[in-house]
């Protein structure tokens, strides 16, 4: 009986370890980037996928709630076709990846990361050679934080927007570095927080349209054609921003939009 009594606590200890993270938390999986698509297909809601280096070529869709962490900067390479990464499941988290080489079609809005779900977190990623960088559509409550985004080497009007937020409320855009894009577009969205970003060498630094109740603070908008457009929006709180070295006076608006 004494031996049996010692086994009971050990059994409960093993069960507790398997449930770290609380009720409903998923499994933790480690793969390389080339195995990511098949791992996502087999994963369950709430799983954590740690991607250790490597390169995945082609487009990828995440259609279930997952946390996907990069380690040693794994690469998602769109190979010059379409959108590289599409997120369609609420609550998904993607961090610490290199996302590069989207397609070049403005009509199809090819992007590095396209989001079509609520409560998405995209943080600590590097986006390179993408047309549109991070594109949120109907993605309420999402976060875009600490990403470094550069666009394709095209004439400015042909570049996509490095960040575009479209019909998405309560979005946080924080501590991103955006270089050589077109505009950071924030349209038809309410209660946005745009804080601590640096946007340089583009057309319009921040381009607001029909966005009420936004907080815009501590951003650096440098060497753009126009620092910021605040259009058809109410109760915008803009404070402690640096807007400097713009290259185009407002009278050039028509020329810039051609």
Image (cartoon, helix red, strand yellow):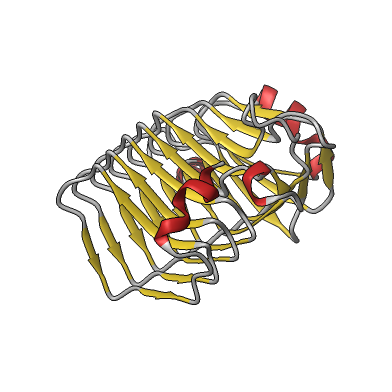
Q: Which quadrant would the C terminus be assigned to in this image?
A: top right
Give the vertical position of 239 relative to 36 (above or below): below
At which x and y percent is residue 213? 19, 48
| In this picture, residue 72 sits left or right of residue 145 | right
**Is residue 240 found left or right of 160 in the rendered image?**
left
Q: Residue at x 25, y 64 (%)?
A: 238
Question: How many marks on residues?
Answer: 0
> Where residue 16 sits in the image (x, y, percent)?
46, 45
Can residue 160 be seen by looking at this rendering?
yes
* Observer-nearest of 60 and 43: 60
| Above-or-below relation of 130 to 107 | below
**Percent of width and height locating residue 147:** 56, 59
Front one among 119 and 29: 119
Q: Quadrant of residue 200?
A: bottom right
Quadrant in the rendering for residue 190: top left
| Residue at image coords 28%, 43% | 170
Q: Picture coordinates of residue 126 (x, y %)? A: 66, 57
Q: Which residue is drawn at 52% across and 26% down?
A: 88
């Amino acid at each position: 009986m004494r031996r049996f009594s010692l086994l009971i606590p050990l059994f409960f200890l093993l069960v507790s370890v398997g449930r770290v993270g609380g009720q409903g938390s998923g499994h933790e999986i480690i793969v390389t980037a080339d195995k990511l698509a098949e791992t996502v297909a087999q994963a369950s809601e709430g799983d954590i996928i740690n991607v250790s280096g490597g390169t995945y070529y082609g487009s990828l869709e995440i259609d279930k709630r997952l946390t996907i962490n990069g380690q040693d900067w794994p690469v998602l390479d769109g190979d010059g076709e379409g959108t590289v990464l599409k997120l369609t499941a609420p609550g998904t988290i993607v961090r610490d990846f290199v996302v590069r080489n989207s397609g070049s079609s403005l009509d199809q809005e090819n992007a590095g990361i396209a989001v079509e779900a609520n409560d998405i977190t995209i943080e600590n990623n590097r986006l390179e050679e993408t047309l549109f960088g991070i594109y949120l559509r109907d993605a309420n409550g999402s976060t875009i934080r600490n990403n470094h985004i550069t666009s394709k080497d095209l004439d400015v009007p042909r570049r996509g927007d490095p960040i575009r937020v479209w019909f998405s409320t309560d979005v946080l855009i924080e501590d991103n570095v955006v270089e050589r894009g077109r505009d950071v577009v924030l349209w038809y969205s309410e209660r946005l927080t745009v804080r601590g970003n640096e946007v340089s060498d583009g057309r319009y630094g921040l381009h607001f349209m029909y966005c009420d109740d936004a907080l815009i603070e501590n951003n650096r908008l440098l060497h753009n054609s126009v620092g910021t457009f605040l259009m058809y929006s109410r109760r915008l709180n803009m404070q402690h921003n640096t807007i400097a070295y713009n290259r185009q006076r407002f009278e050039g608006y028509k020329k810039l939009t051609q």
